[in-house]
Amino acid sequence: MRRVGLLVVVLALLAPAVRAQDELRSFMIVRDSIPESLTGTPGDATRGRAIVANRSVGLCLLCHSGPIPEERFQGNLAPSLAGAGARWSEGQLRLRIVDAARLNADTIMPPYYRLDHLHRVARLFSEKPILSAEQVEDVVAYLATLKE
Amino acid sequence: MRRVRIGLGLASIFAASFAAAQSGDSSRHSGYQDMGPALQKMQDDDSANPGMLFVQAGEALWNQRTGAANKACADCHRAAAATMKGVAVRYPAIPPGTAKPVDLEGRINLCRTANQKAEPLAGESRELLALTAYLARQSRGLPIAPPDDPRLGPFREQGAELYKRRQGQLNLACATCHDANAGKKLAGVTIPQAHPDGYPVYRLEWQSLGSLKRRLRNCLVGIRAEAYAYDAPEYVLLELYLMDRAKGMKLEAPGVRP
């Protein structure tokens, strides 16, 4: 078992550097939504809530307010997340998180799952989307529960 | 009667827009006005403003001989209260015999190397902050007055362009927050209009005095952009634009900010 683990590590080291651009999962946009899950499986709403609440992971509450009462000092630059699941379908939420600029080029909403057309990204974050595909799905699952 | 009222209304609108054109934009306000009364009081009271400790240290440096030339600033410039009044509100500017704008810190270092034959002071060092604060203090209360130098135009435009350019992983421009969303809350904090009217500023978050450059770097880190190198020209370009944008506003240095 240990040998298998070692083999995997060696293979990973030998593998040519994969361009991060290619590491994003492909997705299809239909009108104003991405109907299919980025991972092929539904996200986890509990994990999604934790991501939304975390100011250095989801960053959501810096700009949005939301029904997360234990987090004080929520932002008001953007609409409240309360009722997001009633206003939008999961597919619509997914596109708005992945790349809201596709719907409004002037949006303040950062592109959470996009790597191109970004400038001077800090080394620590370069070639990484703000959230992984799994995290995007978790946030979609959580927002979809916010019906009022 | 209604016609008279409309006439008066139009007249007052014209008067207001004329006044706005005179002073820039009447809706502009300093970050000072977004602070609570306790912090405003701290800035206003010289015995409570921690920036004044730097001003005092700067005064000592002003009078201290240094460098191979063994000259003090005061040996040439005499009493700063008279000779340095109105200097800080003009910078960045293009020093005589050069072609590129420098900020006030850069001007101090030019004088050190050329006239005192001394090493330039390190950016953000206590000494450079102290001298800058001392000079800025001599212009406290004066309106920000960028020099009428046509050579500055293209540099200022580059600064404006930088200010409006989205960057970083969060893909935000200075203008996204400080023009379009100033006054709203980012988390619990009111987004200021980003006027450079208090620098160098004592920031409680820093527990220190700091330059505009340091403040700009904070924002770049916040949007997850690669901060420009400390000696990069971009900071001077941005400051040129910001000072022009704040033209006519009163310099508060040394300011206090949360």
Image (tube, rainbow, N blue to C red):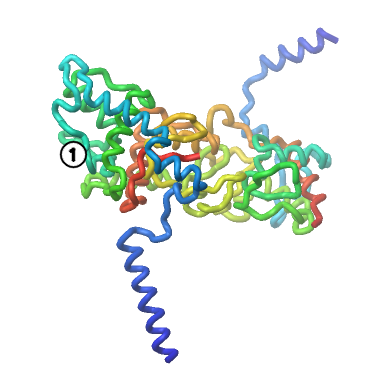
User: Which residue is painted at 63% across and 20% down in the image?
Assistant: A16
Q: Nearer the viewer, residue B133 or A10?
A: B133
* Residue sitting nearer the eye, A30 or B216: B216
In the visual, does A41 lie left or right of B2? right
The chain letter under disc 1 is B
Instruction: Tell me where residue B121 appears, x and y as whole percent.
Output: 31, 22
Q: Looking at the figure, which quarter contains the N terminus of chain A? A: top right
Which residue of the protein is positioned furthest toward the front in this rendering? B47
Relative placement, left or right, of B107 versus B43 is left
Residue shown at 26% from the left, 18% from the top: B119
B140 to B17, vertically: above or below: above
**Residue A140 screen position, x and y as percent:** 76, 46
Give the tally of numbered discs: 1
Q: Position of residue B173 (x, y in %)?
A: 49, 45
Q: Which residue lies at the image location 39% right of the left edge and 33% below the top edge?
A: B51
Q: Is residue B4 above or below residue B52?
A: below
Q: Which x, y percent locates residue A56? A: 65, 35
Task: Estimate how packed mark 1 is, as few (under 14), some (14 to 19) or many (20 or more) residues with alpha carbons within 10 Å.
Answer: few
Name the amino acid type tagged 1.
Answer: Ala
Quadrant of residue A127 in the image?
top right
Query: Which corner quadrant holds the C terminus of chain A?
Result: bottom right
Q: Secondary structure at mark 1?
A: helix
From the viewer's perspective, is B74 left or right of B208? left
Q: Residue furthest left?
A: B76
* Residue in view at x 78 percent, y 43 percent: A37
**Outermost residue toward the right in this view:** A1
> Relative to residue B170, is residue B104 drawn left or right?
left
Which residue corresponds to mark 1?
B82
Q: Residue B138 versus residue A137: which sits nearer the camera?
A: B138
Q: Quadrant of residue B85?
A: top left
